[in-house]
Structures are given as C-alpha cells and as structure tokens.
Amino acid sequence: MKLKQSELDNREIWEERGFELPQFNRSVMIKATRQEPEWIHFGAGNIFRAFPAAVCQDLLNKGILKKGIIVAEGYDYEIIEKSYKNYDDLSLLVTLKADGRLEKKVIGSIAESLTMDTQNTHDWNRLTEIFRTKGLKMVSFTITEKGYSLKNDKQEFINSVSEDFTHKPSDSKSYIGKLTALCYERYKAGKFPLTLVSMDNCSHNGTRLYEAVTTFAEQWAVNGMVEEDFLTYVKEEIAYPWTMIDKITPRPAESVITMLEESGFYDTQTVITSKNTYVAPFVNAEEPQYLVIEDNFKNGRLPLNMGGIIYTEKETVDKVEKMKVCTCLNPLHTALAIFGCLLSYDKISEEMKDKELAALVHKIGYIEGLPVVSDPEIIKPRDFLEEVIKVRLPNPFMPDTPQRIACDTSQKLSIRFGETIKAYANKEGLSTESLFFIPLVLAGWLRYLMAVDDNGNLFELSPDPMLESLTPLISGIRLGDKEGIHEKVAEILSNHIIFGTDLYTAGLGDKIENMFLELIKGPGAVRKTLIKYLD
C-alpha cells in the first residue's frame, strides 16, 4: 500500500486494514479549489496536516465544504517536494489513542502545494494569482512563534527584514515580507478584504501578525515602495483574529512505523531536511485537540465550527489561551521537560509513572495554577486539567520527549510561569510567598543549564536562542558548591525578559536560590530534593 491517488482506487484493501479514506471526489475538489480558492495555509508541518487539514477533510466528507486547502511553505522548501508532491499531496494521520488503538486516516483535503519562494517563478506567480482572487476568505498560519519576529535579541531589525524594507515587495526574502507582498497584490487587484489567521501557539498571535504586517506596509510606504493607502488597507480591510490551538504532534515515531508496516503500509520513510525538519508521509498525533478562533472575519468565514473548531469573542480566546499556556498544560510540560532531562527520561509518558514528577505536575496545576485561572466557560479549566494529567501526559503511545519540549525554554518561562507569578502578586488574597512548586521548577531549570544529569553525567542541552548568554553564567558552578551562588545566578533570576518579572522583586529569588543549592549538593541531589518536597 502506497500513498498515491491511484492506489486509493482499490478502497477495499485499505478499508479492510483499518484505513479511513476520503469520502468525496478528490479530483472534483481539487479542480474547484484551484479555480476559486477560499483557504490557503502557510506552514506545511505536522500540526497543519494533523489538525486544520483533518478538520477540512471531515467537512468535505459531510458535504459542508466543497473546496479544500492550498498549502504553502515559506521556510523549509524541501517539505513540499519530499512530504507533499511525492505523495500526490496526500498524507496519513495516525491518531494515538490512550488505550493503544491507532486511528489511521488518509488526508486528501489538500488541493495544491507550493513554495513561498520569490525565486521560484512558477510557485510565486501562482501565489500571486491566489491572493488576487476575490473569493479568498482565509489565510492561516502555523509558522511557529519565530515566524512573526522582525527583530533580533537586541531589538534590531533582522538583516533580511531591513533589506526588504528598501526593495520592491516582489523581491522580498523574509517570511513576513513575502506575506505582505502577497497582500499588496490583493490590494492592487481590488482592495479585496481578507482574514489572516495565526494558528501558532503564542500569546495574542493575531496582534503579533498585525504588527508584523503593518510594520512592513508602513516601511514600504515611507520608502516609496507602495502607496500610502496600502497601510490603510492592511489595517482596515484585513482582520487578524486571535486564536488558541492545542494538539501535540511529535516527530514520526519508530513504534508507529512498525505498526503501519504491519498493516501493509510502507510509505513510512522519515527524511531529515537540510534545515533539520523531520518529515514523513504520515503524522502521529494525540487525540485531544482544541482550536478557538476570535469571530472576526472580513470576507466571510468558513464553517469550521461545524468541524469542532470554536468561534467566540476575543476576550474568551484570551482566557482559553491563558488557561492552557499559563496554568493547565504548558507549565506542566516544561516542568516535565526540565526534570525529565535531569533524570534521564526519554518519554513524557514514562515520567508520569514517576511518583515525584507526577506529584509535581499535579501540584503545579491544581494547587498553584487553578486559583488564578479566569474561567473561559466554553472549556472548563478543571476538566481541561483533568484530561491533561490523566489522559494526555500519561499516554504511552505518544512518543513525545522531554528533550523536544525543553527546546527554547528561555522563551517560554515568562508566559508559562511568569504570568502566574504576577497574578499571585496582584490578586487580592494571594501572595507569591505561597508559591512553592513553580519556584522548584525554576530552580530545576538553573540546574538543567549546568548540562549535568542527576548521576553527574554530561548531557546535551536542547536548542535555545539564549544558551550562548546563559551557560557562561552557570559554567563556574559545580556539584557540591555552596559559596558564591548568588553572584552567579542573580543576573539570570533578575532578568524580567526571561521570567516576565524580576524574581527577587517578586519575593522568589532567595527561595529559588536555596532550592538550587539543594539540587546541586551532589549526584542524586535532584531526586532527593524532589522526594523531600513531594513525598
């Protein structure tokens, strides 16, 4: 069994082996989508294939939608050739249920795949044609939080961005520059309205996208590259709704490959691109998923709410996002990532069998998180947290690793823990003095930065843009040290960019230092500290 359109004609073989196939005429869908596109998505990675593309397929199966999605990749162009065109724009979604069952679904909702490359004349001209189509309703994105950044750590414009400001839009090289250039084509075609929907896992993502696009429009207008009215257009005729997305899609797992091959499916080869992206014809993902979108659309909205996606007010999106990112999921993941690396775990689900680590995430969520959650009502915080701790994190069939989740931790701490710390400082009846388990995680992160596990062995730190500046501050600390710790960690703990606040001003700096001292007493100190505080 191969992932080709011609292979799907023999439906009986696929269905006998438990594969769900598209229930619509795919050739008719592709023709209709290419002629009058309504939805284009940027970011051709796993979460797109496992979530938005799968929702679109369900709606096509039900006849609610007649058109599919056009996908474009603006960062790693190899994905399009190696993970889309080689397989007729089909993919296989493998849902890993907590009881061990696999749900195997061939996703055929993608009508066309393109590279967002101004040097690729064919694909760029096609993208221009799509954006000039009056009926285009939605442009969505899963390009990671970094995709919206125009500046570096020094708050200076990135070279590719500053260069784009002085060139005509069609010569753009940066991601947002190319996107804004395509919006300019739509402006020239008739100032048609449009909605740009960030589905990336970052706070107030719609505002970040708005600021990035309007910055380009403003700079181009100042430099005479576009009409001044284009800036008005991107501000008034384009909507940038906020969203909250939640679904875990780990890298392709060997265990899943084995199970697929046992089912007779052999298109399982994983390829690592030159930009270190892991791609395969299949995506393995957990079953729970949430996508909440602010109901703010300029050119009509697609009926995604009939596929389980929630449309609601901006304020509710904000509450759901804070519930997930600041209290009920992401902080628990980070806690497991940090201590998982220190205790040499290689699966999140195995950590949940660890008495102390299971207790840690339970206490962070229920004891320190829930008291500051603002109930969004459309999703109950306690129910969400219950699902996370009892179903999602312990799922043994999810091949997610603490090492993957530990990536870019310095960029996550201000949201995942800093917001809760500030809430305790500002909410009547609460005090940061009562926080204990969040400080323990932050002390654990300092211990993690030493790149020495609890047995005293070196390990490789996960990629993080601040490692270059952080590790020299920690490098002089050794297991067993007792003196001079404050001088070495104070610069980190007082960094409000990392934590969203100065932890000493918040009343937590000394507590974290003392916990850190316990964690570095010697080999085995991490485990002993966890037992002391969590048993």
Image (cartoon, helix red, strand yellow):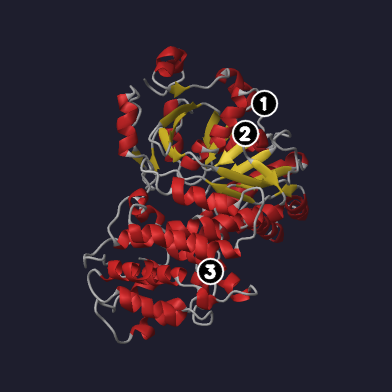
Give the Cα separation between the discs numbered 1 and 2. Answer: 9 Å
Seen in the image, is 247 located left or right of residue 468? right
Secondary element at tag 1: loop
Q: Does the residue at mark 1 contact the one at mark 2 (Cβ under 8 Å)?
A: yes
Seen in the image, is 395 located left or right of residue 49? left
Mark 1 closeness class: few <14, some 14–19, many ≥20 residues within 10 Å: some
Give the Cα separation between the discs numbered 3 and 2. Answer: 34 Å
Residue 394, position as x, y percentages in the image: 39, 47
Secondary element at tag 3: helix
Mark 2 closeness class: few <14, some 14–19, many ≥20 residues within 10 Å: some
Mark 3 closeness class: few <14, some 14–19, many ≥20 residues within 10 Å: many
Q: Is residue 346 above or below residue 356?
A: above
Q: Is residue 367 above or below residue 27?
A: below
Disc 1 target residue: 64
Q: Quadrant of residue 410?
A: bottom left
Front residue of 58 and 103: 103
Mark 3 or 2, nearer chain start? 2
Front residue of 483 and 288: 288
Front residue of 214 and 289: 289
Q: Is residue 209 visible?
A: no
Identify the residue shown where x is 37% and y is 62%. Answer: 338
Q: Can residue 233 be seen in this view?
A: yes
Q: Which amino acid does label 2 sit on?
A: Gly
Marks 1 and 2: which is nearer the front? 2
Q: What residue type is labelled 1?
A: Ile
Q: Which mark is residue 418?
A: 3
Residue 427, position as x, y percentages in the image: 64, 72
